[in-house]
Amino acid sequence: MVLPEVEVSLIIAFATVVGFLFALLQYILVRKVETRPRSDGPSMSISSESVEKMHVIHEAVSDGAKAFLLAEYRICAIFVALFAIVVFILTSRQGNEWNTKVGGFTALAYVIGAATSIASGYVGMMVAVYSNIRTTIGASQGWNESFSNAFRAGTVVGFFLVSLGIASFCVLLRFIGLRFNFTHGADLAEKQELAKTLFECMAGFGLGGSTIALFGRVGGGIYTKAADVGADLAGKVIQGLPEDDPRNPATIADNVGDNVGDVAGMGADLFGSFAESTCAALVVSASSPELVESGWGAILFPVAISAAGILVCLFTSLIAGNIQKVKQEKDIEAVLKVQLGLSAILMVVVVYGIAMHFLPESFHIGGQVVTAKGSFLCVAVGLVGGCVIGFITEYYTSHSYGPVREIAQSCVTGAATNIIYGLSLGYKSAIIPITIISFAVYVSFHLGGMYGVALAALGMLGTLPTSLAIDVYGPICDNAGGIAEMAGCDPSVREKTDALDSAGNTTAAIGKGFAIGSAALVSLALFGAYVTRIQGAAVSSEVNILQPITFAALFMGAMLPYWFTAMTMKSVGIAAKEMVQEVARQFREHPEILEHKHDADHARCIKISTDASLREMIPPGLLVIFSPIVTGTFFGTSAVSGLLVGALTSGVQLAISQSNSGGAWDNAKKYIEKGALVVDGEVHRKGSESHKAAVVGDTVGDPLKDTSGPALNILMKLMAIISLVFADFFMSINGGRGVLRL
């Protein structure tokens, strides 16, 4: 039974409004936290002097983050304005005719998607910065206070981002749908053609979100790793300073980087995944006469999955938040995992209900019979597969398990063996996730074709509010620890924030598994939508991989992730080199900094990271954006097909190995810092030769796990969504069959 259109719209609207209200409530609770000691307030182990220092540091971090994002978004705004013109011109070309209505709405969707992504990233960053100092204050009062402050802030970001994404997508869809008079098509054939046009215009929304995500991930990643690597090499390795020591000139820039890279960039990335997977599902669904005939009730099923995720995650957050309390260190990880696990279980149950009510009992897509139960299973396979990939990622990156402990032990013989072990772990860690992704693709394609693959991707993103809350929670705790260290707080405060951050890193590894898996499925779903589009135009009956142009382009596509990685890694190296030289200069010219007799020039380091990241993020971004456009323009749609397949198959494996190698090196260092590494009765701690080798490995892994690895997710998705948006243009200029006839 398909629910009437009005009921479907009300359900989605209700979930969106509830999501906004819950995010607002959590923000109000975060604001209530006092950031200065009061005589009648809770007891705190922070002196008044430390509190004043904390406010100075907090303002510096906030100002630095704002300055970077405003500078980055100015560049992005200029690019969006210029590229919107390109989108308008190229998408207006429909066969041998020009349709400015289609081009105009596609460009509008592109701009709205980009603006939504910018808003998501900026709000996420501001909330994270706002809550850093409150998490530090909470750590002086107790475990639960500190945990609650950080997780509530993460919840604000998670629920706001998903609610904003759904709201802007649905409003835009309805606006463009009314302009195309979709709901009043004269007959089914006309209605189906209108649906295809409408959803192809909406693909611009995903393109806009992913464009900003690329610049956000690359720019933010270069910023944070330039500061992090510079602080580690010049401060920790050479001078032997502790983590976040105020004498290190790069510490403030490092803390700023946690916000602009791990929060703003990640928020934009996950928003792009939601937008693109939804667009892919809608484009493919337009080929189903039954779905189109059923109206918005069936068509909006992909959006309903995300809306249901808001309600499920809200319920889980309320239940887990009231029942579970963090009373000691071992409770932290359990609380986070229970929320994520419970959300996944409830989501499977809820999706079954909405699939049975939103979709026809059976319908056809691309000549394949798809059922409502089969659609539910596609979502469930994606959700369960994402969970398994997440836990495999945790196994390979957490020092609670053998692989990371092996890397820690390899540090005893130096940095070289540490790096060898880390690279080996990264490559090995791709085996099971790729197998699971392959299984999910096979099952979902068997049950629902490319529509099923898109639903599987949405399944992996079904618990996005909770997953994003956990991801944001980690950088907040990390920054809170930095503020505590720089302000000279009691060591017990830093111990709590480090424990909170460590648990957050473990559960964030699960989130990274979801992100990588969903990126692979999203890009495949978009590729399916692209193929559906070019087949629907009757240009060719199928994509033949054995065509010389397609096979050649496949190799080029497989090369692009390596080219992209080379560019982003070198960019981090260039920026980090400038940072190391600046930190070394300050220590050389003002040695009294090390004796606390002269203040470090943090502002200079912030400027270096900002300038370098904004300068270096442009070439990799242009490579990703224009590769499919140039290929489609000069070599045709078959070449684009090969390019996308090659980029996906190599990109997903490279992303997994890079992220896991970097994460393993990071946690191997932390394992040694805990004093947990014992070899032949000798305990290896901070300052030991083993620890120095671990720091080198962590420094090498930083740009892999926080810049190149995460950005590869966007490379796969962005190339596919660009190909989908410009498919009509590629077919118009060369018939889609081969090389452009000049």
Image (cartoon, grey):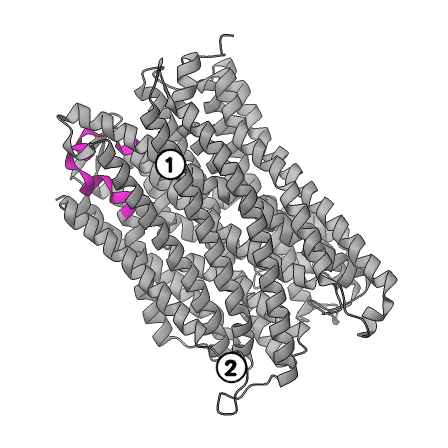
* In the displayed structure image, the side of residue 647 where residue 311 appears, left or right: left
Q: Quadrant of residue 53?
A: bottom right
The prevailing secondary structure element of the residues shown in magenta is helix
Residue 707 in the image: above or below residue 405: above
Residue 511 in the image: above or below residue 137: above
**In the image, what residue type sits under mark 1?**
Leu
Q: Earlier in the sequence, mark 2 or mark 1?
A: 1
In space, the residues marked 2 and 1 are separated at their CA atoms by 49 Å
Mark 2 crowd level (few <14, some 14–19, many ≥20, 10 Å Cα): many
* In the displayed structure image, the side of residue 708 where residue 106 appears, left or right: left
- Residue 105: say if magenta: no
Q: Residue at x 45, y 33 (%)?
A: 84
Q: Residue at x 38, y 39 (%)?
A: 205
Q: Residue at x 49, y 79 (%)?
A: 34
Mark 1 crowd level (few <14, some 14–19, many ≥20, 10 Å Cα): many
Q: Mark on residue 186?
A: none
Image x and y of residue 450, in percent = 33, 33
Image x and y of residue 414, in percent = 78, 56
Q: Secondary structure at mark 1?
A: helix
Q: Nearer the viewer, residue 115 or 327?
A: 115
**In the image, what residue type sits under mark 2?**
Gly
Q: Which residue is mark 2?
A: 142
Image x and y of residue 400, in percent = 56, 64
Q: Secondary structure at mark 2?
A: loop
Residue 271 in the image: above or below residue 471: above
The residue range painted magenta reads 283-303
Image x and y of residue 415, in percent = 76, 54
Q: Which residue is mark 1?
A: 108
- In the rendered image, which quarter contains the N terminus? top left
